[in-house]
Each structure stands twice: as C-alpha cells, then as structure tokens.
Amino acid sequence: MKQLIISICLIFTFSCTDALSDDDKTYVSLDVIEMNVERVNDNLFRWLKFHPDSEFPCLRLEILEAGSNALIKRKNICNVYDEALKVTHDFKKLTFLDIYNLNVNSQTLTFDLELSLLGQNVVNMNCSIKIENTDFSPLECHRL
C-alpha cells in the first residue's frame, strides 16, 4: 500500500512538472495594457497593445494556430509612415501616443492613432492591415 501511494505521488509530481514546463508557457509582458484574441480564417489572431511609456511602445500582432496556440507569424508595429509629411513617426520618439478603436472586421484590423512630437501639432491617423492565413499585408495609414 505504501509503495502504491509513493508511486501515485511520483506520477502526479512528474505530470505536474511536465505540464508546467517553461517551454510550454506563453508569457505576456507586464507592459501590455490591452489585448484581444479573435478567430480569423482557420487560425487565431491576437493583438497586444503595450504601454506608450514602456521600452516597447508598440502594437504587436500575432497569428496563432488554433488549438495549439503555436505562433505562425508576428508583426510589431512600432512606427507609421505619414504620407502628408513624408516622414516615419517612430513610437519611441513621440511625446504622446494613443492607439484606440481597434476592431477586426472581415479579416482586416483597423485602428486609430493619435500622436505628437514635442512642440508639434497632434496627428490623427486611421490604419488598417489585412490578416491573411499565415501573414499580414503591409500597414496602411492615412491622416484623418
């Protein structure tokens, strides 16, 4: 009986240790302030919005395999091209950044940006990116 109990405890210990191995965990940074997961096509689409004052003030897009959550494709949006000024706005260099109105509709993510550099006017933009089965289209942003 004692041997049976020890065997059960060992099996339980090994299975719990295996189930919680670091390789299987998906960590989300503490700098993430908002996230969402939706089914798009046959996969999952996840976006993560990082705090604008963090070292990584970006919007991360991920396509994950449904069921296993294995990463298929990742895209970090850390800057946007401003066609009107012919300049790229790097999110790390901005004095103000807000990403809002994130919405997935018909395999396209749309969102609005409000950004500014020190001493410059606020720029409002609407952006969109198509979510394909295993990749993303180029990001398109236009001033509002």
Image (tube, rainbow, N blue to C red):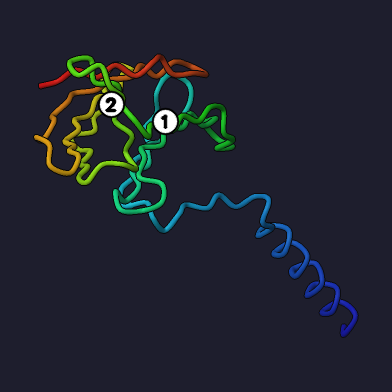
- Three-letter amino acid code of the residue under disc 2: Val
| Farthest residue, direction front | 119
Query: As drawn, is 60 to the left or to the right of 109?
Result: right
Residue 42 image point, x, y percent: 48, 21
Q: How crowded is mark 2: few (under 14 residues within 10 Å), some or many (20 or more)?
A: some
Secondary structure of the residue carrying tag 2 is: strand
Query: As drawn, is 23 to the left or to the right of 43?
Result: right
Query: As drawn, is 130 to the left or to the right of 43?
Result: left
Which residue was labeled with disc 2? 104
| Residue 38, quarter of the rendered image | top left
* Image quarter (top left, top right, bottom left or bottom right) of the C terminus: top left
Foreground residue, 37 or 56? Answer: 56
- Three-letter amino acid code of the residue under disc 1: Phe
Foreground residue, 47 or 9? Answer: 47
Query: As drawn, is 13 to the left or to the right of 58?
Result: right
Rendered view: 93 above or below 134: below
Residue 76 image point, x, y percent: 43, 33
Rendered view: 143 above or below 65: above
What residue is rendered at 30% in x and 53% in y? 53
What residue is rendered at 39% in x and 19% in y? 131
Which residue was labeled with disc 1? 45
Foreground residue, 108 or 51? Answer: 51
* Image quarter (top left, top right, bottom left or bottom right) of the N terminus: bottom right
